[in-house]
């Protein structure tokens, strides 16, 4: 029998913001421990919050083997590795002082706006170890700023937001980013008179990639229920579109290993390369069941059984800046799309609650509420323009992604 411990430690300090004022400070320290046992055929799991008795937790995990949850897979072994991402530019003890400075600046520069939500310092550690010489751990300390804003005359709950996960804090860059969005919101502009217009998304857009992530599931492809079931190893997208699962520390603040303890070469693996679908994403069980390559794509609650899932996808950038990709055209920057969806055949439509007219360098102003539409195979095929080599901000690894779409006023 093999014993394995999956542990997550979290320390957070969160500053709540209401009416552009600090409303409260919350501190939390949480330890979650999962015990897994393997008998070669099944997996048993038990979990504990906070302090726990090791023998009692192990006993519960062994008893869970009686549930006969199949796990006929090799357990990860013989790998020791640690990594750390450490926040710079600000310390936890300066968090309240710095937040108050930012809010005072916003109260002065944007008296017509109300800001709310949270600033959070987090220090998190994830480890996975077993008696087969597996010892993996990752620790990251980060600053997360999420500011919702609304005009004082607005009847909406909020009109827009500014959000960043920050590893290297810079006050000037934070203020510049917030000001750029808020000043753009203040200035109303008209939609260009074109049926199809370059539309810009962040490469972190859940909405734009929803159908691709769903379709690349190894389980769905194995069961022939994916839109890509008959398209494996075929070229279906633009030459310039490549999608990678990346747990590399430069691309992802979480662990470099998946929740089964798999560490890919260079922490990355191709899913789509130059428009060709090369692999679905799989955990060990799905890879074995359907005969696919194992991509190290297992996710799990601390007290759960691993299952297939993507923690972080990376769209490979081009050699061109956003200005170069647009070639002098103005584009719709879909800053806050929400409520859209894909049909089973890939047709896509979505309202965009907040968007800006953008030339790749300057935000000209806020566009009226819009509707955008296309088809999955056009969005990432003939209509795909590319991904900028320049990042949206210096704080994160998000890039601009551009494609031609139909755009109409909402």
Image (tube, rainbow, N blue to C red):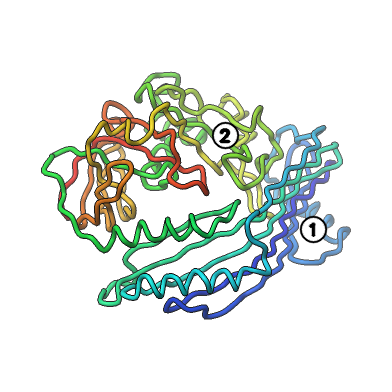
Give the quarter of the figure containing the N terminus: top right
Q: In the depicted view, which residue is nearer to us: 276 or 164?
A: 164
Q: Position of residue 35 (x, y in %)?
A: 77, 53
Q: Residue at x 72, y 53 (%)?
A: 125
Q: Residue at x 56, y 72 (%)?
A: 15
Mark 2 vs mark 1: give the one in front.
Answer: 2
Q: Position of residue 45 (x, y in %)?
A: 73, 52
Q: Which mark is residue 244?
A: none
Q: In the depicted view, which residue is nearer to us: 59 or 298?
A: 298
Q: Residue at x 27, y 58 (%)?
A: 353
Other residues around mark 2 within 10 Å, as few (<14) / some (14–19) / many (≥20)? many
User: Is 388 displayed left or right of 293 in the figure?
Assistant: left
Residue 28, above or below 326: below
Residue 381 occupies quadrant: top left
Residue 29, above or below 285: below
- Cα gap from disc 2 to disc 1, whole angstroms: 28 Å
Q: Check disc 1 and report its element: helix, strand or loop.
A: helix
Residue at image mark 1: 60
Other residues around mark 1 within 10 Å, as few (<14) / some (14–19) / many (≥20)? some
Residue 188 occupies quadrant: bottom left
Q: Position of residue 373 (x, y in %)?
A: 23, 43
Q: In the depicted view, which residue is nearer to us: 125 or 192?
A: 192
Q: Check disc 2 and report its element: helix, strand or loop.
A: loop
Q: Looking at this rendering, what residue extends furthest in the right direction?
A: 55
User: Is 95 displayed left or right of 55 in the figure?
Assistant: left
User: Is 398 displayed left or right of 150 in the figure?
Assistant: right
User: Is 140 displayed left or right of 212 in the figure?
Assistant: right
Q: Which is nearer the N-term, disc 2 or disc 1?
A: 1
Residue at image mark 2: 282
Residue 326, above or below 353: above
């Amino acid at each position: 029998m093999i014993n394995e411990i999956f542990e997550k430690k979290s320390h957070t300090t969160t500053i709540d913001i209401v009416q552009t004022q600090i409303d409260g400070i919350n501190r939390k320290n949480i330890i979650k421990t999962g015990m897994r046992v393997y008998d070669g055929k099944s997996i048993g799991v038990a979990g504990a919050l906070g302090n726990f008795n090791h023998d009692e937790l192990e006993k519960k995990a062994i008893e869970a083997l009686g549930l006969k949850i199949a796990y006929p897979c090799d357990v990860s072994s013989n790998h020791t590795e640690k990594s750390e991402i450490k926040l710079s530019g600000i310390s936890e003890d300066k968090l309240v002082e710095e937040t108050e400075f930012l809010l005072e600046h916003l109260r002065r520069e944007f008296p017509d706006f109300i800001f709310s939500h949270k600033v959070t310092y987090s220090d998190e550690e994830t480890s996975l170890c077993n008696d087969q010489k597996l010892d993996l751990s990752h620790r990251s300390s980060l600053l997360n700023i999420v500011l919702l804003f609304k005009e004082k005359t607005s009847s909406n709950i909020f009109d827009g937001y500014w959000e960043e996960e920050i590893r290297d804090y810079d006050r000037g860059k934070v203020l510049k980013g917030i000001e750029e969005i808020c000043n753009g919101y203040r200035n109303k502009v008209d939609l260009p008179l074109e049926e199809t217009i370059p539309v810009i998304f962040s490469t972190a857009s859940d909405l734009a990639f929803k159908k691709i992530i769903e379709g690349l599931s190894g389980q769905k492809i194995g069961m022939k229920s994916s839109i890509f079931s008959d398209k494996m190893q075929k070229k279906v997208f633009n030459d310039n579109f490549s999608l990678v699962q990346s747990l590399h520390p430069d691309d992802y603040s979480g662990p470099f290993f998946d929740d089964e303890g798999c560490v890919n070469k260079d922490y990355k693996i191709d899913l789509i390369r130059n428009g060709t679908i090369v692999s679905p994403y799989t955990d060990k069980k799905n890879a074995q069941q359907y005969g696919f390559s194992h991509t190290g794509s297992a996710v799990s609650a601390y007290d759960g059984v691993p299952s297939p899932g993507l923690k972080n996808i990376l769209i490979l950038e081009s050699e061109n800046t956003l200005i170069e990709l647009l070639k002098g055209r103005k584009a719709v920057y879909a800053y806050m799309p929400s409520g859209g969806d894909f049909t089973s055949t890939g047709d896509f439509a979505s309202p965009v609650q907040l968007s800006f007219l953008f030339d790749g360098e300057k935000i000209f102003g806020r566009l009226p509420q819009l509707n955008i539409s296309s088809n999955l195979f056009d969005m990432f095929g003939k209509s795909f323009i590319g991904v900028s080599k320049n990042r949206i901000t210096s704080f994160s690894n998000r890039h601009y992604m551009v494609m031609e779409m139909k755009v109409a006023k909402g």
